[in-house]
Every structure is written in structure tokens, then in C-alpha cells.
Image (tube, rainbow, N blue to C red):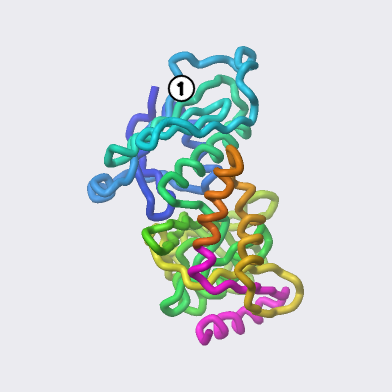
């Protein structure tokens, strides 16, 4: 049984039609990738990049009967036009010779706990995106004047707060938490992956005149309020822009902006985003590194240290505008 109507699934500017056999599979995608599902407009439907169907296997086996399958496995196979991606719980087949691309994602085992199923979806979808030269990053992107700055860092590094400071200064936010990096021809483009911003109590007090009229919720252990970006500041999610600066923020107690060498930037990109990937072997990992190294060669790299004094973010706005 599939959902009653197709929904639009978006990974930045890359979008398509989703049909899911179970609501839990749709919920897993939404949780892992922070994506919202919407109705496709006729224009979006005509320009879609893919059709993704998620269904149970006709020979679905119970976990107790699947002991022969190696757990936590990843296998890449198929042909150039019909590549396959498989874990012990999911199997994906892509028809790259069709437009929109046909993607069939089959659930092989029953009774997989929801948290484990989220992991499998994360592994497979990341690999599917990489087939289209796209990489989802845990990052934020803001257009400052005519240049896009990409902020990459762990939870608590200051990405969201920095985005708010730049937005309040009139800059345009592409994405606050998830962005998609696309290797397009000889260059790279970046698009925001969500329409929402999440605000802590401290940043709310600093950047907003009045309390936001939404309840705070727990996001990975931190209470935040989630708001639509477009209701409060300029935003352009789901559109491609060429990035020009790559910044690695972290809160250390002292505000400073320093140039960073390409090799150090590559190590940090791997540290912050490599754990979202799973690799079949050395060649698979080398392709990932080549993608990141090629991107880093196109941007200027910076180390950004932040203090607890949010007023110092005004200095960052000026530095980025005048750089």
C-alpha cells in the first residue's frame, strides 16, 4: 500500500516525486534530512529530477530470518546506467537512462527499529545523491553582498547564530542547517536545504524585539523555537548559488577571522561531514575526498572563532562585507 498521493521531496535545488509504501519511511526521510514534504505544483512536476518509490519487498523477510546478510554492510553494484546501492535492510536501483531518473528503494527486512531504519535511509540516500554529484552538508549558507559564504561546523559551533546576525544585517540566508553542494561542470554550486530557522532562547532575546509566538521544542537536546525564515528575514532556499568563501566557526571566547590552508580545510570538511557517509572501500572514499578537494580549490578558506558576546558578530558582518 502506498501513500494516497505523490509528494515533493527536496534536497536543495534537486527535487522529485516521492511515493512511499509506509508512513514510517516518509517520517525517516524527514527526520534524517530535515526535509519537508509538499504537494508538487504543475511547474515543479514538469521540472522534477527524479521519481522515488519506496516499497516493501515481495519477499520481505523477518529479522530472525536474515542472519545470512552481513549487518551494517554496504554494497555498490549494477551497471553504469543502472547502478545499485544496498545495505542489509535496503536495496536501491537507479535508472539513469530515464528522465526523470527512476529510483526504486526496496525495504528488505521487516521489524527494523525506526532509529536503525533512519540510519539505513541516511546511508543509501547520501549515496544516491552522490551519483548526481551532490553532497548534503551539515552547514549553513548566507549570501553577503554578491558572495555566498558557507559555514561548516559541529552542533554548537555558532552556525545558526551567525546566520541570524547576517540576516539582521540584510544578508540573504540560503539554508541554516543543511545545504546541498553540487559539482556542476567545472565548478560547484550550493543550495539551501530547508525553509526553517531554529532559535535558542539566548539568540531570541538578542535578535528579536519580542518573544517569538511559537513554543520551544527539543532539538537533539537543545530547546529551540522553529520559525519559517521568510517570515522574519530574506531567504532563498532551494536555489543554486556559486559559493566563494568557506568558514569554520567555533565558539572559543575570542572573536577572530583567519585564513586557513586548503589541506587543513579538507581535514575539517572530512571531520565534520565524513561521518554522514559510509564507504564501500578505498576507491569509494577516494571519490568523496576528490569531490571535497575540488570544491576547496574553488573557494577561500577561513577559521572563524566566536566569543559569547553576540554584539561582536557586528564586526563579522563588516569584515565579510569588506573582505
Q: Position of residue 266 (x, y in %)?
A: 61, 62
SS state under label 1: strand
Whether residue 39 is situated above or below residue 170 in the rendered picture: above
| Of the pair 86 and 310, the residue shown nearer to us | 86
Q: To which quarter of the image does residue 224 belong?
A: bottom right
Residue 86 shows in the view? yes
Magenta stretch? 295-323
Residue beneath the point at 45% across and 51% down:
134
Report the residue at 47% width, 36% height from top.
26
Residue in the image at 66% along x and 81% along y: 312
Query: Which residue was labeled with disc 1?
Result: 56
Residue 22 at x, y percent in the picture: 46, 27
The quadrant of the picture occupied by the N terminus is top left
Q: Residue 143 magenta-drawn? A: no
Residue 319, position as x, y percentages in the image: 57, 84
In terms of image quadrants, where is residue 116?
top right
Tag 1: Cα neighbours inside 10 Å, few (<14), some, or many (≥20)?
some
Direction right: furthest residue: 253
Q: Residue at x 44, y 79 (%)?
A: 145
Amino acid at each position: 500500500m502506498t501513500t494516497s498521493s505523490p509528494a515533493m521531496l527536496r534536497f536543495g535545488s534537486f527535487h522529485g516525486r516521492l511515493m512511499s509504501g509506509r508512513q514510517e519511511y516518509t517520517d525517516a526521510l524527514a527526520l534524517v534530512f530535515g526535509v519537508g514534504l509538499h504537494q508538487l505544483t504543475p511547474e515543479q512536476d514538469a521540472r522534477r529530477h527524479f521519481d522515488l518509490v519506496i516499497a516493501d519487498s515481495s519477499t520481505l523477510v523477518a529479522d530472525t530470518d536474515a542472519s545470512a546478510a552481513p549487518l551494517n554492510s554496504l554494497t555498490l553494484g549494477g551497471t553504469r546506467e543502472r547502478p545499485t546501492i544496498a545495505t542489509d535492510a535496503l536495496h536501491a536501483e537507479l535508472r539513469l537512462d530515464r528522465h526523470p531518473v527512476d529510483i526504486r528503494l526496496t525495504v528488505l527486512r521487516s521489524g527494523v527499529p525506526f532509529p536503525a531504519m533512519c540510519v539505513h535511509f541516511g546511508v543509501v540516500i547520501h549515496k544516491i545523491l552522490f551519483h548526481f554529484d551532490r553532497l548534503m552538508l551539515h552547514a549553513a549558507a548566507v549570501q553577503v553582498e554578491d558572495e555566498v559564504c558557507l559555514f561548516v561546523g559541529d552542533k554548537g559551533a555558532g552556525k545558526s547564530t551567525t546566520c541570524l546576525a547576517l540576516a539582521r544585517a540584510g544578508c540573504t540566508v540560503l539554508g541554516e542547517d543543511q545545504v546541498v553542494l553540487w559539482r556542476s561542470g567545472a565548478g560547484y554550486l550550493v543550495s539551501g536545504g530547508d525553509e526553517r530557522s531554529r532559535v535558542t532562547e539566548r539568540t531570541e532575546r538578542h535578535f528579536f524585539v519580542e518573544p517569538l509566538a511559537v513554543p520551544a521544542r527539543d532539538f537533539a537536546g537543545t530547546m529551540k523555537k522553529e520559525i519559517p525564515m521568510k517570515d522574519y528575514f530574506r531567504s532563498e532556499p532551494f536555489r543554486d548559488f556559486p559559493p566563494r568563501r568557506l568558514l569554520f566557526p567555533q565558539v572559543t571566547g575570542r572573536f577572530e577571522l583567519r585564513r586557513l590552508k586548503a589541506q587543513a580545510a579538507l581535514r575539517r570538511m572530512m571531520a565534520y561531514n565524513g561521518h554522514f557517509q559510509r564507504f564501500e572501500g578505498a576507491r569509494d572514499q577516494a571519490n568523496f575526498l576528490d569531490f571535497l578537494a575540488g570544491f576547496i580549490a574553488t573557494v577561500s578558506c577561513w577559521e572563524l572563532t566566536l566569543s559569547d558576546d553576540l554584539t561582536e558578530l557586528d564586526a563579522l558582518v563588516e569584515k565579510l562585507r569588506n573582505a
